[in-house]
Amino acid sequence: MQTPRLRTGIVHSALGCAAALMVCGAPGAWAQEKQKISYKVTEENSKYTQRNTIDVGDESSHQLVMFEIHRTFPSNAPVINGVKLKETWTRGYADYINSNGLSTNYTIYVLDNGDKFYTYSGTMGQADATGKRTTVAVGQIRGGTGKFAAMKGLVRSTGISDGKAGLNETQAEIEYWIAK
């Protein structure tokens, strides 16, 4: 039987080991130069290409939603690691009550040279009385292809959406580095 003092000692030891591993194992990551870019995609360049809704049936307006959003950058495309961003494809699923709730999103960023990078993010959305939602999201960059194979970082975004009306706009900041 472990006493509270023994458990505390074990926890402190584990935290100390984790901190030591982070300090010893991360110098290469610390040496990478972080870059930040931001962009905005308005309604005319952001389209729901698929949206499927299932009523859960346990209470009014409780829905499960699967969706796909295609965004393009016809002008003022952000430049990432020296290459212009061409388009993004976001695929996700959500659990909403009256359009309020959380979604999980997977986004593929496609660059002009054909390279890609991938993100996984969570979004929280809150709807007004008309169903128009404001959203806040944060996600992890999980690597990519070509020049972006070793890409890491974060994506933070805010937006407005109304899936039923096909409205979707977003503003995002990407903070990234390419591991060596």
Image: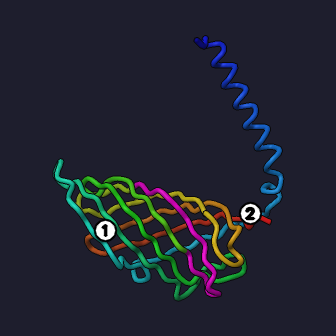
**Residue 122 screen position, x and y as percent:** 47, 56
Q: Is residue 28 above or below residue 9?
A: below
Which of the marked residues, 1 or 2, is nearer the chain's N terminus? 2
**Number of callouts:** 2
Q: Please name the residue shown 65% across and 19% down the image.
A: 8
Tell whether 47 sits left or right of 35.
left
Q: Residue furthest front?
A: 1
Residue 75 percent coordinates (x, y):
55, 87
- The dominant secondary structure in magenta is strand
Position of residue 145 measured from the top left corner of the image (x, y, whole percent): 65, 76
Relative to 158, 65 lies left or right? left
- Of the residues shown, which amino acid type is indicated by label 1? Asp
Give the Cα separation between the discs numbered 1 and 2. Answer: 34 Å
Residue 100 picture quarter = bottom left
The residue at 20%/59% (across/down) is 55
The local crowd at label 2, few if under 14, some if 14 to 19, many if 20 or more residues have their Cα within 10 Å, is few
Q: Is residue 158 magenta?
A: no
Residue receiving disc 1: 162
Q: Say which residue label 2 marks.
A: 34
Disc 2 residue type (three-letter)? Lys
Query: Callout 1: 10 Å neighbours few (<14), some, many (20+)?
Result: some
Q: What is the magenta range? A: 109-124
Quadrant of res 67:
bottom left
**Viewer-nearest residue: 69 or 5:** 5
Placement of the N terminus among the 4 image quadrants: top right
Q: Nearer the viewer, residue 128 or 142?
A: 142
